[in-house]
Image (cartoon, rainbow, N blue to C red):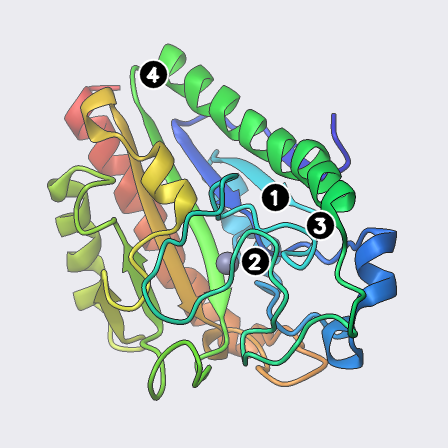
Amino acid sequence: MSDALRFTKGRVPLLISMPHPGTRLTPAVERGLVAAGHALPDTDWHIPQLYGMATELGASCLEATYSRYVVDLNRPADDVPLYSGATTGLFTEVLFDGSPLFQKGKAPGAEARQQALSEIWQPYHHALVQELKRLRETFGYALLWDAHSICSRVPRLFEGQLPDLNFGTFEGASCDPELAGRLKAVAADQQGLTYVFNGRFKGGYITRQYGVPGEHVHAVQLELAQRTYMDEAPPFSYRKDLAAPTQAVLRRLLETTLAWGRERYGR
Ligand SMILES: [Zn+2]
């Protein structure tokens, strides 16, 4: 298997995709980064640890090991922009705050980019496609949860403080509306975390590309505010005290997703 990913095969029709927790760098990227870039501030920190309960629930897990500074797995290979306004692309040259990611003239060249596409982007998407196919063949349907997190304040990307739970269903196109309704009910039935559906984050490339309800693949993206489980300033420590109640909500969301699938498809 490619060293660009870690994959755990589960026993239920749910795949958790984690495209942004990786911290590995290629030599070309590492040589070129500015000092601020080496701290990898735009990482989806600790997401595999936070979602540890998904393995207990029997979900399959796919986790990227390389940083989004090498190649962004939640962008299309042709790099067509997903969001109007400020965003970052397939090969970002800026940090989320808009400052340069690379020293002058040190951004990786075309050859290094092509290599990242074929050795990091392609294997991740190949594994994703294969697992969704296996789940559909085994269960008749597949549930895809694209797991992300972001600092709750990034002035260049959004105004003020982000809600805690940012669900993206590509405006309802990536999953059955009934599943979205069940998730909304879970979010409404707890006090600790604020939430929004299809707000600033509507679902990135993975959600849009693979969520095809008509073909019985239902995808949901959850962009979680990092203040719900970690320190948002370096060294970006995991906070068990904050994470525990957040994990309880995540667990309910995943259990609800699985229960909806069993009801809808009878297995
Ligand atoms: Zn992310």
Q: What's the mark number on residue 139?
A: 4
Q: Quadrant of residue 113?
A: top right
Identify residue type, mark 4.
Answer: Phe
Query: Given this view, does label 4 or label 1 mark the residue nearer the observer?
Result: 1
* Quadrant of the frame with the N terminus: top right
How far apart in space, not on screen, are marks 3 and 1 (Cα)? 9 Å
The CA distance from mark 2 to mark 1 is: 9 Å
Q: Residue at x 70, y 53 (%)?
A: 70
Measuring 25% from the left and 40% from the top, which residue is drawn there?
Answer: 174
Q: Quick one: 64 or 74, which is closer to the camera? A: 74
- Dots 4, 1 in contact, CB < 8 A: no
Task: Give neighbour class at mark 3: few <14, some 14-19, many 20+ (Cα, 10 Å).
Answer: many
Asked if the residue at tag 3 contacts the one at tag 4, i.e. Cβ–Cβ closer than 8 Å, the answer is no
Could you classify mark 1 by the number of other residues whose Cα lies within 10 Å: few (under 14), some (14-19), or many (20 or more)? many
Between 7 and 86, which is closer to the camera in this rendering? Answer: 86
List the residue tagged with mark 1.
63
Tell which tag, 3 or 1, sits nearer the viewer: 3
Residue at 80% x, 80% y is 35
Inspect the image, locate mark 2, and give the three-letter code of the amino acid beneath it.
Ile
Q: Amino acid at mark 1?
A: Glu
158 lies above or below 73? below
First along the sequence among labels 4 and 1: 1
Relative image position of residue 139 (x, y in whole percent):
34, 16
* SS at badge 2: helix
Local packing at callout 4 (Cα closer than 10 Å; few below 14, some 14-19, many 20+) is: some
What is the C-alpha distance between the residues marked 2 and 3? 14 Å
State the residue position of label 2.
Answer: 47
Sequence-earlier tag: 2 or 4: 2
Asked if ligand 1 lies within 8 A of label 1, the reply is no
